[in-house]
Amino acid sequence: MSSLIDPILVAVLLLNLFALGNSRIMTVIRVVGVQGALLGILPLLVHEHFGLLPLVVSLLTVALKGLVIPFMLLRAMREAQIRREVAPSVGFLPSMILGAFSIGFSVLLAQELPMTQAHLGLLLVPASLSTVLIGFIMLTTRYKAISQVVGYLILENGIFIFGMLLVEAMPLMVELGVLLDLFVGIFVITIIVNHINEAFSSMDTRKLSALKE
Amino acid sequence: MTNVVVHLALLLAMPPLLLGVINKTKAFFGGRRGPPLLQPYRDLNRLMRKGLVLSRTTTLIFRAAPIVSLVAIFFAGLLMPMGPFGSPAPAFPGDLVLFAYLFGLARFFTTAAALDTGSSFEGMGASREVTFACLSEPALFFALLLLAKMSGSLMLSHMVHSPLQVHWTLQGPSLVLVAVGLFIIVLAENCRIPVDDPNTHLELTMIHEVMVLDHSGPLLGLILYGAAMKLFVLGAFLLHVIAPFQTGRAWLDWGLFAAELVGLSIAIGVVESIMARLQMRHVPTLLVASILFCAFGYFLLVR
Amino acid sequence: MIAMAFALILFPVAMAGVAMAFPSNRARPWLLPFTGTIHLVLTVWTLRNPELQAPVGWLVLDPPGRLILLVISLMFFLCSFYAIGYLRYRGDWSNRTFTSCLLAFLGVMTLVIWSHHLGLMWVAIEGTSLVTAPLIYFNRTPRSIEATWKYLLICSVGIALALLGSFFLAYASFHEGLESSLLFEDLLHHAPRLSKPWLHTAFVLLLVGYGTKMGLAPMHTWKPDAYGEAPGIVGALLAGGLTNCAFLAVLRIYHVMVAAGERVYGGKLLIFLGLLSMLVAGIFMIGQRDIKRMLAYSSVEHMGILVLGLGMGGIGAFGALLHLLNNSMTKGVLFLSAGNLRRAYDSKSIDDISGAMRRLPLSGTLFLFGFIAITGSPPFGPFVSEFTIVTAAFLDGRYVTGALFLLFLLIVFMGMGGTVLAAVQGRPSGRSRLIPYRDTFLTGAPVVVFMALSLLLGLWLPAPIRTLVQEAAHYLETRP
């Protein structure tokens, strides 16, 4: 079972780079949805004993990350009627290259951190660190509000990957709490995004520049 | 011995057939019957019998370029093993670099010939072609590097046969990634959609076609033939990665190889039919993606 | 018998639900002082009877928690009366979301204080972000939407990093073969055996994450916008309540570091961030024209002072915890009176505000005295706590730190003084005389009480309070 984890993580990392390089927001939202669904399968693979609880968590994650949240974002997008990201502060191609470098950097960083015998050689820590970094890159360099929210989603995905290391040890209640918080957070953010659209008739956060020194 | 003869025969005779297959596939998607499969041979024949028209601004380079590029690609074809067999040219460690740079030599001469005409259109095409080559060569080298790591050798003949003995769960993902990256390189180097439309008649949108605008008659024939041979050789390289099968019987293996090449041409035709050509400013993104695919595959292998 | 922990946490949340359903817009604000009074009474009762502080599963009231619980309960109590006056002035606007979010805010903050499990604490702090966002957006202007957006995004990212840090900490114990628990008791118990690389990385991530919530530089960029656009009462509760809860999180993490023997590493990081926050705040306060943004930077500065004292340890920690109390009281004065000024002049900028002492005698004078208090002048509270921290610095031999601390305080004084004196002195403009706003009892009395408390703490520290602060500071040195 564990031999499937690495290919899934490779697919997740490639989806990250694809999300960084793409300018169509709808595609990026769907990509992050696919990524979330892939990550939802991970709890089933990491748990050594196939029980009811990991199954429930897995189904919940797939439903939330793969269906519900992309649906909410796409609906917010439809109401705002935006299609494409404007040229971000770091261009699409340089972002992709920066993302690739962050993957390399995460691999180097992960080698500094000692792992237990069972987890040695797995891609989990580099994948999680690089996904967090890539989410951060997307969050800070994009101008459209929805793209920033997608960057936040990718960041949360990265943290979820790391959580897989602790799936045996941590109480499932906290993992469920994390999922719930993600859901509520995205819910509130979508509402705010709608308000931004109403107030400014645009999702371009460069218009949100009245408050500065 | 027979293998060498078959290798040479295929290398010399089969390339225009691949072009014919691609055109037939595209016609099929368009609901047409399309040109006959052997039409490229007839085209070459016609071109060879035509007269040569040379521009007054051109020099020796313009006349020599098609010949040099064809010879370079032919030698690259000699270096690249086909199917499970060895290569006719003597193999030595490091011949992968020679392989990559023979293509570079061919490209250099074609570009020089384009600049030799003094036309701004051809210069524009030349600069585009070279820019894209800057991005596709690293991808090619990463792919070669991966094969070198997998086989532990720097000889092409050993490297390309290594996927035959691969352990699929361990190295499978790397091979898949490299295969995707190489496919993109094949499309880019041979000026296929989504990088370049071979059927376009608008000079501003041309990349490779505009470089050869001034060539005529036999020289144009040599260039077309060389381009077809380049598709053949790169396709043969790609086949080693995606279809490393071997039956053990020589004639069956050669037949399988030819069939696989035809299959690859059909695949290229399908890709050309279902996709639109990318905007030129997006092509670097695609090429960087192929670099990342190959680099990723390599990184997975060495981790 | 229902445990006191559940009562303190769930009662405000239940009242939030009542507020959502309450039909009358005029009478709804009275739910606030009702809840605040009961919460304060229950808090004082709990603090006086140690048996009521019994742990309930993951809910434990440790000594620093007791101090901060008292502070936020007191702040909410006083601000709730102010809220009635404020909402009466804004009677045309629906206050349903506002009131219920304020009540839920109190409940979630109490949950942060009581939770002794890293994961539960994280959930609670994330909850405070979500529940305060509508409060900042109360005025529905484009600028407040911009402020809310930045607040939500930056705080969510910070919280996400804090979650990653929590996971790292759990792995630090998992790696050593210990039972991987996020309960503080277990973490403190196993602290010396935790894997060092994981522990260090976890500390950095947690500090950055919860430091974002506190408003430490360089993660403070949301503060000027959020505090600037929020109503005065929201600013007071954020500056005097929420930042303290975030500080509690940082304090608990640092406690784990101390127990693991990494005091030097952790302390250096905290001192660095503290000094940086003070410097950044001072620089941005010079020439600041907006009085609420100035107060936001003041909050950044004082959060810096808090972590500085915490990082120094010993007497410095005592000073920091005392400063927490003083800072909250004084911020109450400043934010509430700033809110009054804003309404009288219909502007937040000193381009429009002048002669506040003549136009609004009570609020203007209290604003001036608040400035004097917060910059550390005797006889007010902050002077005592800042003096304690400076003394600790020089006694420990940290001369450079102490000198920088004094220098940055001076820069802050100069910057803040320029703005406050320009607002308070002079003659009011003609336009402001046309606005019929006056100081009322409900918008004035809480400010007076805050000021009186700040003065009281400066002159005489009551013994129960002193014991509370001492126990909290001593807790950092212990390991259960």
Image: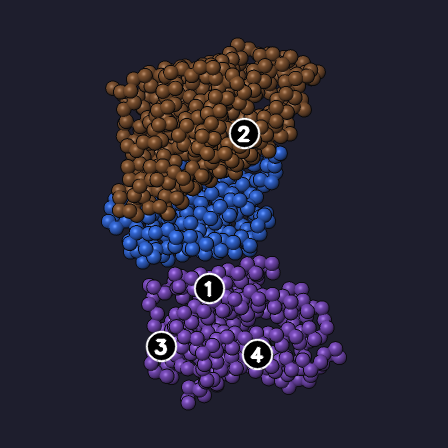
Chain colours: A blue, B purple, C brown
| Three-letter residue code for mark 3 | Gln
Q: Which numbered disc, 4 or 1, marks the residue that appears first in the sequence?
A: 4
Are the residues tagged 4 and 2 within 8 Å (C-beta)? no
**Residue A45 location, x and y as percent?**
30, 52
- Rounded to the nearest angstrom, the CA distance separating label 2 from label 3 is 80 Å
**Residue B191 location, x and y as percent?**
57, 69
Nearest the eye: B212 or A155 = A155
- Rounded to the nearest angstrom, the CA distance separating label 4 from label 1 is 26 Å
Identify the residue at image location x=61%, y=82%: B67
Identify the residue at image location x=67%, y=80%: B61
Q: Which residue is mark 3?
A: B246
Q: Nearer the viewer, mark 2 or mark 1?
A: 2
Identify the residue at image location x=50%, y=80%: B77
**Residue C262 location, x and y as percent?**
37, 40
- Rounded to the nearest angstrom, the CA distance separating label 3 from label 1 is 25 Å
Q: Which residue is mark 1?
A: B294
Pointer 4: residues within 10 angstroms few (<14), some, or many (20+)? many
- Rounded to the nearest angstrom, the CA distance separating label 2 from label 1 is 57 Å
Identify the residue at image location x=60%, y=12%: C361
Query: Is any part of residue B296 visible from this angle?
Result: yes
Mark 4, chain letter?
B
Mark 1, chain letter?
B
Are the residues tagged 4 and 3 within 8 Å (C-beta)? no
- Rounded to the nearest angstrom, the CA distance separating label 4 from label 3 is 29 Å
Q: Which numbered disc, 4 or 3, marks the residue that appears first in the sequence?
A: 4
Q: Which residue is mark 2?
A: C406
| Three-letter residue code for mark 4 | Gly
Q: Element at badge 1?
A: helix
The answer to whether tags 2 and 1 share a subunit is no
